[in-house]
Image (spheres, rainbow, N blue to C red):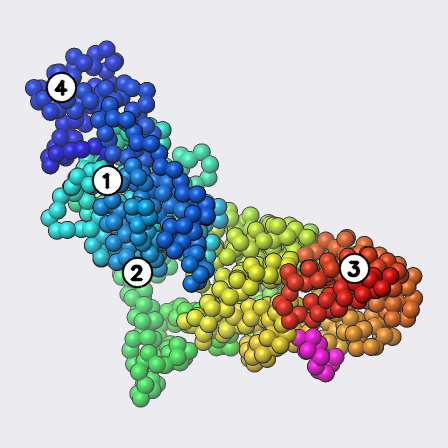
Amino acid sequence: MPMTMTTNATQDWGRMEAALDHLLDLPATEQPMALLHLAGGDAGLLAKLRRLLDQMAREDTWLDRPALQDPGPLDPPGNAPAAPFASLAPGQRVGAYRIIGVIGRGGMGEVYRAERADGHFEQQVALKLIRREAIDHVDRFQAERQILATLEHPAITRILDGGLHDGQPYMVMELVEGQSITAWCRDRGIGLDGRLTLFLAVCNAVAYAHRNLIVHRDLKPGNVLVTPQGQVKLLDFGIAKRIVSGQGADPETLLAPLTPGYAAPEQLLGGPVSTATDAYALGMLLYELLAGARPWTLEGMPLALAVRAALQEVPPPLSQFAARADGPPPVPMRKLVGDLDAIVAKALRKEPAQRYGTVDALARDVERMRDGLPVSARSGSRRYVLGRFMKRHRLPLMAAGLLTLAVLGGLGGVTWQYLRAQKAVARAETIKAFVVSLFGATDAGFPTDRRRRDVPAEKLVDLGARRIEQEFGQDPGLALELYGITRQLYQSLDDAESATRIAAQRTDLGRKLYGNDHPIVIDSLFDEVWGAITAYDMGKARQVMATLDAVLRTSGRDETAYRAQWWMAQAALLKSGPDSQLARRQALDQAIALYERHAPDDPDYIRALQNAAILRMQTGDYAMAAALYQKALDHRLATDEADGVGIAPILVNQAVVFERLGRTGEALGNYERAGPLALAAGGVGPSYWFALAQRAKLLHKLGRRAEALALYDTLLAQIRDDPTPGSPHIRTTAAQVQLVYANSLTAEGRAADALPILERLRPIFESQPDDPRDMRRLRLALALASAQLGRDDARVLLSQLLAENMAKEPNGQDTQDLRGQWGWYLLSHGNMGEAAQVFDDAIRDEARLRLTSITPTLAWTGRARLMLSQGNVAEAEAAIEHAQAAYDGLRAAHDVRIHTTLLLTRSAVRLAAGNREGAVHDAATALADAQRTDAPESPLIRQARDAVAAAEEKNQAH
């Protein structure tokens, strides 16, 4: 607080605050007389009040400065301010570091971007240097340095070095590239769960500092950055303080600059700080994260008034403030009412003893809120605790609500209703005990020679499934629920076969209890269908689909979400048949229409839109695919499930469509947005990997090799470090990422590095056929890598793949691209006749393919090579001009190395036609491009060097 206070600072401020309140309400002409009366003979109070009034009367006084500027220590009014310290110039050395530029300035120091300059290793850092006019506060600077040196936490900025420069202390810290936590969430549209995840990461870092007896004292969005990868970083321990038992305020504390909008009342009063001080700031940070703004705005307000507002005003409830916002709040109001209102209110209480005593307690309440458990901020209310229990066990406890109706209507039905409610509670407890017993108890079938933690989860669920009929045969309703839970457990373990088997048992039991057309039976039949499709048991799936069709027709459910789901399953079944695209599209159109009419809020509606978009993309209707993805995205954002889990996949798939439409900027934007969303929602894992892999792949295609390889390095390190390598889904996704990486290696001329990776992936895709196309993509990657290395198996692989694709999807994009690659393989191996036929076929389809496929460019370029080999220079010139025109008209994102190949061919054509200067220019351009996009050992670079040499030699000869 920029004001010198006595040891009775709290009491003095209380008297000053009351007097100042009265004075500020009076006209300026009446203030001097009132001043004498309010001081009541206290000369010290009179002097302080007079000084404050004198300062407020000036045009440019400290108390009239905006509250969120850094005013520095308060000097007597007549003191002239020190001259501002000149920034270090770029290139200037400070110790072992070279200054690059200024990052920012504070009340005590300046922070620079710098780089290691002593040649030991390359590293960019943040260098903080104390300002000359703040040299009197060198103890605080040194304290920050010592504090950072003691803190080793991934979310706290690390100190790397320190020393003196021209008598001024400096410290070197980890350079953090990122945005403030509020801006990061706003720019990426992060939902409630993602925001709470980041907030808990901040709490974890602050709690770690507290355990090391450090209070930060300046927590605010600007000091909490989030990196592009979604990593929280806590900055600026410049006014942090060690906690010493029994220590009160000290002069350095009182002079420390702070941010009134986030400062706790005890900081503003100059009182002792504690862990509750940081809890207050975290409460304000959470308020801003969830409501989009703080409850009061102090920017531009004179500091005296800002302090008064922060001390006296009680923030409105979080949900009410969010509801009054001009625009839509970042989190819907209904999600803030109740627990989050209470948590924020407790954190922001004026009295430290009434707040959370520790940051761990605050974080624990946030975690309990997410888990549907009672929070301490609302402790003491039996109605509230019971309400949380009922919310967690909504279905089993629905009957308990009837007890209230019985009381309102008289006491006659109370006994029956009460017993029914008791039974519902007992049922919930039985379900919980059963699930817990799967992992915490033993039974007759458990292997006695093994510890339970050493037994795979699948085995534990198998044991539980066998117990359902044995232990709950007398309560079939309860057995139905347990079968449903067990099926979900199998599904989460990627055991489709067992999930389908349990769903069938649930169906049979449901029929016995309720008949053929009860919703439980229908749901179980759909579980069987989807399980069979996932397990590629199409015969079983068709059999159950026929049963479902009859049930839906006879029960009058043709115009319901059930029939929409049936059409979705039908589309998935048709996927396995030849020439099925039209029928699949019609099935999905039926599903979408039914959802729009009868169940627009059904989560499967979004899935139907996405499936329809995928189908449109496969048939080349990219504009419609983009529109369907946008519709799915808009709908997802408008629902309660607007989180990274649901949004990230839509963004990634839409980005793939944007690539085909040539909207590469939007595609990269989607990938960049999807990665952090997936990270915030599910942490480092498959969704995050896939988003980053697609972005790296596009960057590599665009020739931004260094950026792409850096992303790949990050991805591969995460895959190696993944703690759950046994999960089939994670294994498959990791393999898909490595396949994308290997393709990029081949594209840049490193087939020798790609081939071992691809060979390792074969058994993974064979054992986990998530998508049959994975195996086709792997075989194509193997073929292209083998072709680059001159292996004989490349011809067989390419010809087989082309035949399969022509039979399955003759007009598909992958098929057309493969035609061009096959033609060039034939050309490079001297099969001129076959190559000519492939190129001629592709050229005939140019009108249909030219906007979205590389094939016309490859075909015309290949034809130019063919004509040149036959000595027909005029035809070669015409063909290469057609190739350039096709390339210029290509709208889809593509590998820029294609143009390098085109340039090399045109160089050869121009050389044969006598245009030696043009040939040299094309060859040199091709070489420069290849050196930028390819590895040094790339065959393309070698070809470009040969072309440059040939063109220059012929040019010099003439």
- Binning the other alpha carbons within 10 Å of mark 3 as few (below 14), some (14 to 19) or many (20 upward) gives many
Return the x and y of residue 324 as percentages of the image width and height: 40, 34
Q: Disc 1 versus disc 4: distance between alpha carbons?
A: 36 Å
Q: Which residues are magenta?
A: 785-797
Q: Disc 3 versus disc 1: distance between alpha carbons?
A: 67 Å
Q: Is residue 51 above or below residue 735?
A: above
- Binning the other alpha carbons within 10 Å of mark 2 as few (below 14), some (14 to 19) or many (20 upward) gives some
Label placed on residue 38: 4
Return the x and y of residue 10 as percentages of the image width and height: 14, 35
Element under label 2?
loop
Q: Is residue 77 above or below residue 231?
A: above
Residue 792 appears in the picture as rendered: yes
Q: Residue under circle 1?
A: 136
Disc 4 marks a residue whose amino acid type is Leu
Label placed on residue 920: 3
Is residue 787 within the magenta segment? Answer: yes
For the point 87% across and 71% down, which residue is it? 869
Label placed on residue 152: 2
Mark 2 or 3, closer to the camera: 3
- Binning the other alpha carbons within 10 Å of mark 4 as few (below 14), some (14 to 19) or many (20 upward) gives some
Q: Disc 1 versus disc 2: distance between alpha carbons?
A: 29 Å
Q: Decide: marks 1, 4 in contact (CB < 8 A)?
A: no
Mark 1 or 2, closer to the camera: 1
Return the x and y of residue 429 as percentages of the image width and height: 29, 66
